[in-house]
Amino acid sequence: MADQQDRDTAPISDGDITPPPADASFTPAAPLKDAGVDFSPASDAGGETGGTVAGAKQALRDNVAKGREQAADKARLFAEDGKAKASDALGQLSQMLRDAAQQVDEKLGEQYGQYARGAADRVQGFTSAIDDKSVDDLLADARELVRKSPAAAVGVAAGIGFVVARLLSAGLDQRDA
């Protein structure tokens, strides 16, 4: 009994730890054993261990491709919605210019009103061009514009950004009032 106590209180030595033999196979713990996961090593043609690694890679590729398709579909829906809203806004702008042209005719003369009508016609033509093209065609036109004259594209983007910022701030100011 005293000999057993001495062994229990003695420090651990290298002789106390015996590693498993090199050919021992892995046996999962009881909860994992029944989890449906195959722990047996298998080698496939690519040299990877287990067919599950190749399957996981393929599943990941499939999920990434599916995610890209879904993102592209959502982006297309947002672009179609934006195109419709822009077309409506340009139509309203054209109508406002026509109304302003009538007031300019009355106050300053028809010569100056003609300028406003010309601007309204150009805006209406631009609106029709947007309505007639698909989102893909509009993107292709935008890419071509940027490729041909990047300085003009930056100027147009800055101008649109300024107008959108002003519209948003005016909308927020009206909502706060």
Image (spheres, rainbow, N blue to C red):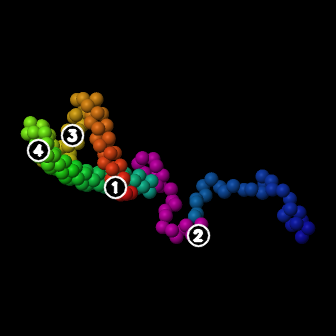
Q: Which residues are magenta?
A: 29-51
Q: Residues within 10 Å of mark 1 (few under 14, many from 20)?
A: few
Please give the label number shown on residue 140.
Answer: 3
Q: Which of label 3 and label 1 is nearer to you?
A: 1
First reached walking from the N terminus: tag 2 or tag 4: 2
Q: Tell which circle, 3 or 2, labels the residue nearer the N-terminal end.
A: 2
Residue 80 visible (yes or no): no
Residue 171 position within the rendered picture, expressed as x and y whole percent measured from the top left: 33, 53
Q: 54 or 21, which lies in front?
A: 54
Residue, disc 2: 30
The residue that mark 1 highlights is: 174
User: What residue sits right under mark 4 in the picture?
Assistant: 106
Identify which residue, 125 or 114, lies in the foreground: 114
The answer for how far apart the CA atoms under marks 4 and 3 are is 43 Å
Q: Is residue 33 magenta?
A: yes
State the residue in front, 169 or 60. 169
Q: Quadrant of residue 129?
A: top left
The three-letter amino acid code for the residue at tag 4 is Glu
Q: Are marks 2 and 1 in contact (CB under 8 Å)?
A: no
C-alpha distance separating marks 3 and 1: 37 Å
Question: Which of pointers 2 and 1 lies earlier in the amino acid sequence?
Answer: 2
Q: Earlier in the sequence, mark 1 or mark 4?
A: 4
Residue appearing at x 29%, y 43% in the figure: 163
Q: Residues within 10 Å of mark 3 (few under 14, many from 20)?
A: few
The amino acid pointed to by label 1 is Gln
Camera-nearest label, 1 or 4 = 4
Q: Is residue 36 magenta?
A: yes
Q: Position of residue 148 (x, y in %)?
A: 22, 29
Rendered-image quadrant of the C terminus: bottom left
The N terminus lies in which quarter of the figure?
bottom right
